Image (cartoon, helix red, strand yellow):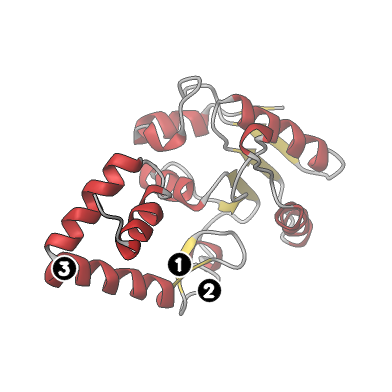
Amino acid sequence: MKHIEPLDNLITALARLPGIGRRSAERIAFGLVKDRRNMAAGLAGALDDVIRNVVLCSRCGNITDTSHNPCGICTNTQRNGRVLCVVEGPDDIQYFEASGGFAGRYHALMGKISPMHGEDISPEIVRKLVDRIKDENVEEVILALDTDVESDASASYLHEVLSGLKVRISRLAYGLPSGSGIEYSDPVTLSRALRGRQQV
């Protein structure tokens, strides 16, 4: 098949998205080309809208719109500001919120320690976490990370960094399946994991 540069670029861009491999990217790209007027134009408009109007919360890293930054969770006075739930990314915040089992605030790390994949936790995000704990008089930090090796390494690192602060550090109870991610857990499991958290 003759290579068409714009199409190749689209396939490459789609294949970089989480959960989409090369073959899926090709199918999506061909579908967009076949229905350019509706599907492609609609997708382009939605992407442009997200680029212009959706940001990460400047305080916790949650997904929010540009007119509400810090996000509604950070500014909600009814939430318990003394308990901070540390998660790997903003998608995890959405899963916890759907469970309805947590009424505190969040801090997204935007990654985890994974030398194999060249990932690390940004020192700036860790510094912001430490500053929040001090400035907001946080009493408990819940390390709500996945149960894989990289997340365990991240939890150990954070425990070491935070152990000098006057704060209780806990991890989720192991109601989550080993080797699985928070996004694959149902709301009941997440609620039980939060309630059964243990100090580390």
Q: Which residue is mark 1?
A: 64
Dot 3 or dot 2, earlier in sequence: 3
For label 1, the SS is strand
Tell me how far mark 3 sits from mark 2, CA to CA.
35 Å
Residue 27 % position (x, y):
22, 47
Q: Which residue is mark 2?
A: 69
Residue 143 % position (x, y):
63, 37
* Nearer the camera: disc 3 or disc 2: 3
Callout 1, which amino acid?
Thr
* Image marks 3 and 2: residues in contact by CB distance under 8 Å: no
Residue lying at 35% horizontally and 62% vertically, measured from the top left: 5
Tell me how far mark 2 sits from mark 1, CA to CA.
7 Å
Residue lying at 65% horizontally and 52% vertically, measured from the top left: 82
* Image marks 2 and 1: residues in contact by CB distance under 8 Å: yes
Callout 2, which amino acid?
Asn
Callout 3, which amino acid?
Arg
Most foreground residue, 173 or 139? 173
User: From the viewer's perspective, is residue 200 above or below residue 30?
Assistant: above
For label 3, the SS is helix
Dot 1 or dot 3, earlier in sequence: 3
Q: Which residue is mark 3?
A: 36
Dot 2 or dot 1, earlier in sequence: 1
Tell me how far mark 1 sits from mark 3, CA to CA.
29 Å
